Image: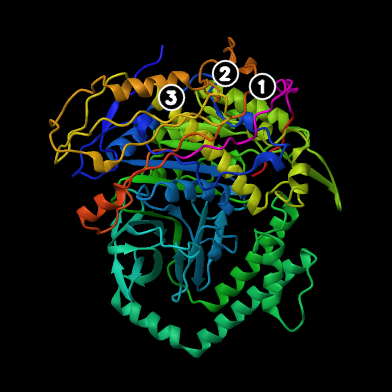
Amino acid sequence: MKKKLAVIAAILGIVSMGSMVSAKDMEITPGYYDVDFTKYDFIDTSLNTIQFPQGSASFEPFFKKLDTLVFENRGKVRILHIGGSHLQADVISGRIREHLVKEYPGASAGRGFVFPYSAARTNTPASYASYYKGIWDKNKNVQHEITKPLGLLGIAVSTRDPRAEITLLLDKYNTEPIWGETSFRVFGYSDSNDVEPVLRIDSMDVFGTFDASSQSYVFTSPRPIDTIQIAFRWADTTKQAEVAAFITDSLFKDSVARADSLARVADSLRMDSLGITPPASSSQQMAQAVAADSMFQGDCEDVLDTNCLNRDEDMQAALDSVAADTVPPRPHFTLTGILAENNAPGITYTNVGINGAKVANYFEEICPLFEKEMSYYKPDLVIFAIGINDANVEVFNDKQFREEYDKLIKRIRKVSPKTAFIFETNNDSYRKVRKKKYVQHPNGEVARKAFFMLADKHKAGVWDKFSIMGGLGSMAKWEKADLAKKDKVHFKTAGYHLLGDMFYKALMQAYFDHIANLPAEAPVVAQAKPVQAKPAPAPTTIPAASSVAPKTQAPSAKTASSTAPATATAPANAKAAAAIQAKVAAPAPTATSAKTAAPAKPETTAQTEVPAKQPVAKTVAPPQMPKIAAAAHKDVPMPEVVKQTAQPTQPKIQVPLKPIPQAAEKPTAPAPSTTDSK
């Protein structure tokens, strides 16, 4: 029996309007990211859903926070996406974040955690730029020897160089400014109390407040900014004067030049290890050659190459030895992360990833500050994408793999007990056996089954990336389609974007399944200036014979009059009845049901039956989340805001992800075997 959707008031966040709006009446657009999947027939879009082996009840806290944000324009929703090199590069996660920000302007509550990866001489996430000055040493959770306590991000940089600075340009690669941050928490510590970070705004140094409980410095910007510039100051003004004099000393400049020269030599050695011969006359062209060859420039070409990783650490040791000779003894400052947010309601999406990371690299022995730093973020949803490095072994111990995930999940639940979890199965990958010779990785399917068992145990969701992309051997097809790299582990930008598009659609479909099951009646939210909406026109639907989903036309905000009570109960009017009729006439939802699609729960988790790839009718691009106030962060006069958001909405057609075949359904394929990428 179809339930009537609740009538919800003024979800656009404009308090002067009180028109009543139903969830079914929200503006629906195809999405600027729709992809023609007909040229990628190896991708099984029918499997592009979030599967819930134990149902979606554990997602209710996350979905309800989204409801509060979407329908009442208040509160914050925090998402954490954690993995290996795929997440350090921030292309797939950046794509998902891009959809959230661009499709729903005004929904951003900040950029989240960021880090000066360039100071650690590794690739910076593709979504922002990182620059540094001075001599820094690094600690990453994948190193053999770690000398500094690490936190949530699994990486730290330390300096005792008086000229040290770091700069992050959050809007560097955005065609239009997106980020306007006002609150910053710099996580870090000094081996004495003599040095502290300062936030540099408009050439002025702003001192923060030290929070001893979190080992962080809290800064507030007087205006929204998208550039984070951190310098360091010694608490004793006499020492600061000595530092200023020391920086001008010619001997110091010469010694720094020697250190920088050695860094360039180390980079050239790395070029040699990659087989790249730079022109003798152009070091700049040499750097460009590496940038063109790999999106992971500045790091090992193959992040699974342990010999390269070890060689990189040897180069670091050489640089540290020069730094010790050139910079006189003075306090160290170690930076473990920067949390950038603002005070507006919205969504914050943080990516966490280190090239080569495994599940155990985030354990307490390596990252003791993990929970402490996470307690200031408290994610509502955690997306796990760790696994490709764990499975990159001759014999994969899936039992140990699950136990390690259990430990990591326990750390997260200690901080945020109601967090919802989604596991990404590993992408298919190949293993290099000799030069230019690759073989299919045999551990992919084993890892896939392990992820489903974890989801069953922890009442989590699963996005079966391995099966969606085509199963065992599909990475070769992605490479042929110019979506994956030659290493057959990583994707090209187009491939990451495609994965991000599909994950986003699957997540939004899961959310709209939740909306479809909202209570039949709900009180209307009171507004500052209550008004009553006129009855909406009958919904416009597309004939059932078409392959396009039925569509309702959103009511215009201009039709509102001014006589509604402050609070009321949603009436069962003609508009609601028409909406129900349209819903009944619509084809059955193609997304896998949270309860019906899940395999029956066995007596013990260890024997959980993992579903084979079950073909489903090709999914139509899911409806998009209701638009959130575009002017949430801007100083726009209220009448102008109303004018901008009150334009009549024209009905738009939804295009299916993939043409629905006219013949019989695709036969059931055998359960694929898997391999994942970082």
- Which secondary structure lies at badge 3? helix
What is the number of the mark on residue 58? 3
Question: Start and end of the magenta stretch?
Answer: 652-672
Disc 2 or disc 3, which is closer to the eye?
Answer: 2
- Disc 1 marks which residue? 614
Residues at discs 2 and 3 in contact (Cβ within 8 Å): no
* Mark 2 vs mark 3, CA separation in Å: 16 Å
Task: Please name the amino acid that badge 1 sits on.
Answer: Gln
The location of residue 296, given as percent across then percent down, is 65, 58
Q: Quick check: is 669 in the magenta stretch?
A: yes
> Residue 194 vs residue 550: left or right?
left
Earlier residue among tags 2 and 3 = 3
The location of residue 578, given as percent across then percent down, is 36, 22
How dense is the environment of label 2, judged by Cα within 10 Å: few (below 14), some, or many (20 and up)?
some
- Which secondary structure lies at badge 1? loop
How dense is the environment of label 1, judged by Cα within 10 Å: few (below 14), some, or many (20 and up)?
some
Task: Tell me if residue 661 comes above or below residue 624 in the rendering.
Answer: above
Please give the name of the residue rendered at 25% of the width and 38% of the height, measured from the top-left corner.
10
> Residue 564 vs residue 275: left or right?
left
The location of residue 667, given as percent across then percent down, is 74, 21
Residues at discs 2 and 1 in contact (Cβ within 8 Å): yes
Task: Please name the amino acid that badge 2 sits on.
Answer: Ala
